[in-house]
Amino acid sequence: MKIKLPALFGLLLAGIAPLKAQQINEQEVNRIISVLAADSLQGRNTYSPGIEKASLFIESEFAKAGLIPLPGAQDFRQRFATVGRKIYALDSVPADQSAQFLHNVTGMIKGSSKPDEYVIFSAHYDHIGILKAVEEDSIANGADDDASGVTAVILLADHFAKHPPERSVIFTAFTAEEIGGFGSRYFSKQLDPAKIVAMFNIEMIGKESKFGRNSAFITGYERSDFGKILQKNLDGSSFQFHPDPYPEQRLFYRSDNATLARLGVPAHTISTTQIDKDTLYHSVNDEIESMDMKNIADIIEAIAVSAKSIVGGKDTPTRIAEENK
Ligand SMILES: [Zn+2]
């Protein structure tokens, strides 16, 4: 059968039209995560020279995206001190104690119509440093945990800078998650929780979830309607956010969302980890070779799309029940 040229053209157009260009670029994912998980960063242990290198890189990416420092800050470093497991603001360290110094990397985009309402995207940039050598490799690179999440935060900063939000959006890379969540504990005290509309914490999105491609899970899914809002914004796509399939692992309380969640903020962690059988977790083999770059780009893309109505000031997730402090 002969097809007339205009008809053929129409068929081609019909085939092309439904495809929407992906906004999050896989090559960019590869570039960023490769820097963060490089051997030269020595596993990004808190207080180490390696984590300082990670910080400098994240700061340069935040600057490139066009983020501004938080109100009252001169730069992207949110500095504080620790003495043992106690956390202090820099001006309140007891004089007779020897403190250690550390910082979160934090920047923001000011909202155009609701600047006093905040949405947070976060991940932790520290990892566990150097371990006992396995086949002459002793660096715990932490590609999945949590260079993958920091990569998401950097690319979401770039994305929302290009699509200016109605609410203010804060992007933060937390320090010292692995040794006690010090970074998120300090961060959470610097803002009024009543002004924080939602927190998207991103932990380990480097590999396929147990539900396969185009899926991730949300910890504490049933504690607010955050997950339902995200899913609604994905109408017409095949991406699915699931409730946390590992409730026995208590992941809701094991990441940086927990501090703000206890204060009532709809603060959830988005992840794809198969924590029950991931043999690379906290090992020297959590390296970029095991990362699925396409999957990471797809998850970040889904987060960008699903956050649209929250960042845009149209949807406000219900609060999480506060816990005794
Ligand atoms: Zn982690």
Image: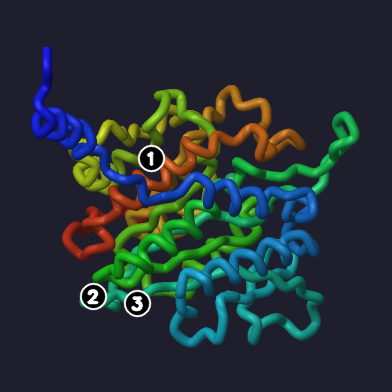
Above or below: residue 38 compared with residue 280: below
Give the residue at x 47% y 69%.
Answer: 65
> In this rendering, would 125 be left or right of 258?
right
Label 2's element? Answer: strand
Few, some or many C-alpha atoms within 10 Å of disc 1 (few <14, some 14-19, many ≥20)? Answer: many
> In this rendering, would 291 be left or right of 252?
right
Marks 3 and 1, the one that precedes in the sequence? 3
Above or below: residue 292 compared with residue 94: above
> How many marks are shown on the rendered structure?
3
> In this rendering, would 117 be left or right of 204?
left
The residue where tag 3 is placed is 110
Give the residue at x 59% y 22%.
Answer: 277
The residue where tag 2 is placed is 114
CB-based contact (under 8 Å), mark 3 and mark 2: no
In the rendered structure, which amino acid carries the disc numbered 3? Answer: Lys
CB-based contact (under 8 Å), mark 3 and mark 1: no
Above or below: residue 1 compared with residue 143: above
